[in-house]
Image: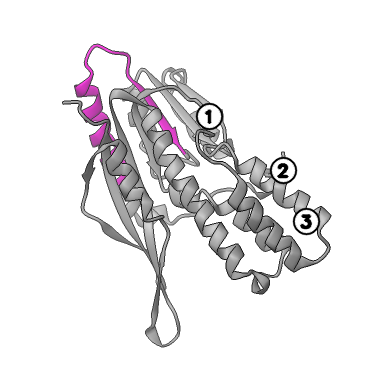
Amino acid sequence: RAYQKFVQAPEDLPFSHGAYANRNRTEIIQTAQRTIERSPGQEQTALVLGAGRMGDIPLEELAQMFDKLTLVDIRTEQTRKAVEKLPPELQQKITIIKADVTGVTGDILQGIQQQKAQKTDQEAFIDAVAQDFRAISVADKPPDLGAHTFVSSSLLLSELGHLPMALMAELTNRGLFSDQYRGELFTLCGRLQIAHINFLAKSTAPRGLVHFVDTFSDSIQKAHGVAQKNTLVDPGVPLALRKLFTVDERPSTIWDYSPKKQYEIRSFALRPPLVS
């Protein structure tokens, strides 16, 4: 498929440093326990989106807590390796699904490749891609994975536009990116993010809960101690969260990713509205 070349192994996040990963694992377990208490006597199913290598996910605990556990990622090699370390009785409860949670990444990348083949002028190519970004529909495109009593999305939403960015960076000179292209790219990423929130709502059972955590901004130290702050999440995402869920936001934290880079981490427990 068109995107396979650009699906790389997850960035080697410094999970050994502990702060983010330990907190995320604890919060997942807490939310999972709450959702089981909300629906006693029912089959308990969990869905982990963007499973990756499970570095920040309490895999064994989730497999113990739930009757069925589904792990989803666009690349599943590392996920499979993590599952193979579990006892056989827990492995039997787990399904691994290789899927693009946006439902459109392959189409976007294929469109970029087609425009590259048709346009010999680089500026014309970039402008054509920008028009394609504007035209593509992202609503209701994610796969139907059923409704689950627990859903987890950790550090996934802010990465949904990464593959188109990576392909365009390989095919072009970034210095030629026009304001129109950058604007359409940011708008597309925002639409993918809001579609992801809708996907979370559709994947959650009426009495279920969602654990949602992401990097809402980063801060990069430049020369002379000047910090450049970048917003990573569309402003419409918090609005979509409150439209579709009752929101319990935990205190935000700063993740010291490296000596010169920090992330603002925001974490939420989400439940469908009007459910006690």
- Within 10 Å of the Cα at label 2, are there few (<14), some (14-19), or many (20+) other Cα atoms? some
Query: Which residue has dot 1 on it?
Result: 143
Q: Which residues are magenta?
A: 24-49
How far apart in space, not on screen, are marks 2 and 1 (Cα)?
A: 18 Å
Residue 59 to residue 226: above or below:
above
**Image quarter of residue 81:** top right
Q: Earlier in the sequence, mark 1 or mark 3?
A: 3
Residue 273 to residue 56: above or below:
above
Residue 127 is inside the magenta segment: no
Looking at the rendered structure, the secondary structure element under dot 1 is loop
**Image quarter of residue 226:** bottom left
Q: Earlier in the sequence, mark 2 or mark 1?
A: 2
Residue 262: image location, x then y, percent: 37, 66
Query: Which residue has dot 2 on it?
Result: 2
> Residue extending furthest bottom?
224
Query: Which residue has dot 3 on it?
Result: 116
Looking at the rendered structure, the secondary structure element under dot 2 is loop
Residue 10: image location, x then y, percent: 54, 49
Residue 40: image location, x then y, percent: 21, 15
**Image quarter of residue 36:** top left
- Look at label 3 and name its amino acid: Lys
User: Which residue sits at x=75%, y=64%?
Assistant: 124
User: Which residue sits at x=43%, y=34%?
Assistant: 199
